[in-house]
Image (cartoon, grey):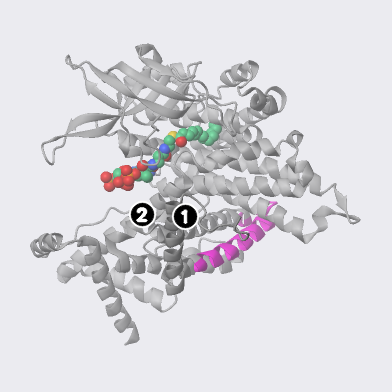
Amino acid sequence: MLKVGQTILSQSRLQICAQRLLVTSSAHLKAAQAQAVEKAERPAKEVKEDLSFVMNIFRGQIETKQLFPYPNVLNTEQRETLEMLVDPVNKFFEEVNNPAKNDQDEKIEETALKGLWELGAFALQVPQDLGGLGLTNTQYARLVEIVGAHDLGVGITLGAHQSIGFKGILLFGNPEQKKKYLPRVSSGEYAAFCLTEPSSGSDAGSIKTRAVLSPDGKHYILNGSKIWISNGGLAEIMTVFAQTPVNDPKTGKIVDKVTAFIVERSFGGVTNGPPEKKMGIKCSNTAEVYYEDVKVPIENVLGGVGNGFKVAMNILNNGRFGMAAALSGTMKACTKKAVEFATTRKQFGQRIDSFGAIQEKIARMQMLQYVTESMAYMISGNMDTGSQHYHLEAAISKCFASEAAWNVCDEAIQVLGGMGFMKDTGLERVMRDLRIFRIFEGTNDILRLFVALTGIQYAGAHLKELQAAFKNPTANLGLIFGEASKRVVRKVGLASVPKMDHLVHRELAKSANLIAKDIDDFGQAVEMVLIKYGKGIVQEQFILNRLANATFDIYSSAVVLSRASTALQNNSPTAQHEKIIAEAWTLEASERVANYLKAISSGKNLDNFSKMETISKKVCENGGIVQSNPLNI
Ligand code: MYA
């Protein structure tokens, strides 16, 4: 009886929730009602299923296809190729590249740049027949990790070139565009990704640079300017985003839509400002780029007229795992420095690594690095096996890695104490270099909102589907019964544990149960938020941030459980170490998830959010801190 009652309760909550999503005004209400009557006789429209683990936890579901087993995607030949590359790249960074000098000179030494081109480091993923090394994402991740361990400024020069600069040509270029440009970007011509503008940073869709068709229809005439363009002063070939007038098929009107173009400096009208003075990644070039009546041939439209926003987003999505890979390398290097010091330095008659305060720091460095590395190779592996459903995971990996690396570098400096603060130790450069990673390629703040809102939209779409199903229950019994029984299973406490149990190694079953319970709680929290706020959830950033943070903890836990399970199954020499890391990480992550979910549901916390809103408004009205000092002087 109880179970049936709960199911009915769940059904009515779902209907309310779906209605909230559909209905925002009385006009909409009438239209929605009319549509609902019309559609009632039809079977419910199916929502496109998404294989992303993160997307599905917003529905309280565990989608394991991209999670288990931990990807092992390199075939023998790819492994051998990678083995052949790792040593020379390591050697290059140890013997040729000088990060301190690059930083001081604010440019990469010529010999190092020449060496990088010769190594093929600027064309890691360009197909071999077009002049590159033709590496997979996983092979790329491994090499980028080495770059990140040694010199993030060089990493940005390489990354701005291939991770975003010409990535659009790789992903969206037609055969002619690939044939024309990929050999050039593989053999000495720099590329850049030109999206950001003075009035358009996070709000990428609001760019003002415009391109209009020339009277003869053969060119687009491009005008506008871009700021903070990595490689902007070096690039010969640029992926430039501009508004173009297009016919909107829905309204028949001409509207502006973003289009991507391949622009060559040699087209004329392209100039750039001086190199920007920056806090870190000083050896990389960052500059403004100006376009004045640049004649871009129509065949240089990339990905179709009006599709530029999606082109830009997909380039960024596709490159984000590289940041996680690079920063995993950075964390390894910082941890190594901290450990070298902690295991030799004696204070109070003991080596400092014997003190609990230091042990906790080192353990956390190792855990953060393990999680980041596991995410990077999980995502690159998924991408290599053809996944199209990795956008949220990639965004999480970028945010997680940039915050983890900052933390690890900071704690390494703390372990080294005064020595860590000294320039010669090299950590202060890494810290300066790291700061930008939380800002560029999508600020971590905007990516948190992206993750939360995309997940909520997916969960909401399923709820709409369910609501439609209720209009014609006989035609949709399977859907309704399936959803209802999932919810009953949740209520009786089984959650989705069995689904994880046979995939996670038995030694990690306890941790798997914790995460399964978190996913269940998370799904219910999302449902609650949808019922309460409906479409208004887009404005609730205090809540969205906490939902995003919970996804970071759930995803990171699931990833390490997958990797550590594989290590245990394979009897890897480090399996027990990895198991302990996974257990420790999962326990703390699960506690954080509980806190985030509590914060978005408890009246006390919600009240605190409005207090913070009030404080912030007051400070902004006041132009800074509101109160005078205690001395009133
Ligand atoms: S480059 C500059 C980086 N700039 C940004 O990242 C901009 C951030 N802003 C955004 O991403 C977007 O504007 C946001 C959405 C997310 C805020 N994937 O109405 P909407 C779809 C797929 O939400 P908006 C730099 O920093 C969405 O579903 N689709 O859009 C260089 C919807 O579709 P539909 C997406 O509110 C640094 C439509 O778009 C995505 O305007 C150098 C509209 O959505 C997405 N992500 O804004 C780095 N987002 O209409 C060097 C939205 O169908 C590299 N949509 O429903 C270093 C590499 C590491 C080292 C490597 C060493 C070698």
Q: Nearer the viewer, residue 285 or 14?
A: 285
- On whether ligand 1 comes within 8 Å of the CB at mark 2, the answer is yes
Report if the beta carbon of the residue with label 1 is closer than 8 angstroms to ligand 1: no
Residue located beneath label 2 in the image: 453
Using the rendered view, name the quadrant where residue 178 is placed.
Answer: top left
Chief SS of the magenta region? helix
Q: Which residue sits at x=23%, y=57%?
A: 46
Residue shown at 63%/34% (left/top)?
Answer: 146
Q: CA distance from mark 2 to mark 1?
A: 28 Å
Residue 619 bears which disc, if any?
1
In the picture, measured across the screen, residue 257 lies left or right of residue 85, that is left
Question: Callout 2: few (<14), some (14-19), or many (20+) C-alpha neighbours within 10 Å?
Answer: many
> Is residue 55 shown left or right of residue 406?
left
| Residue extent of the magenta highlight | 568-595
Give coordinates of residue 12: x percent, y percent. 25, 75
Q: Amino acid at mark 2?
A: Leu
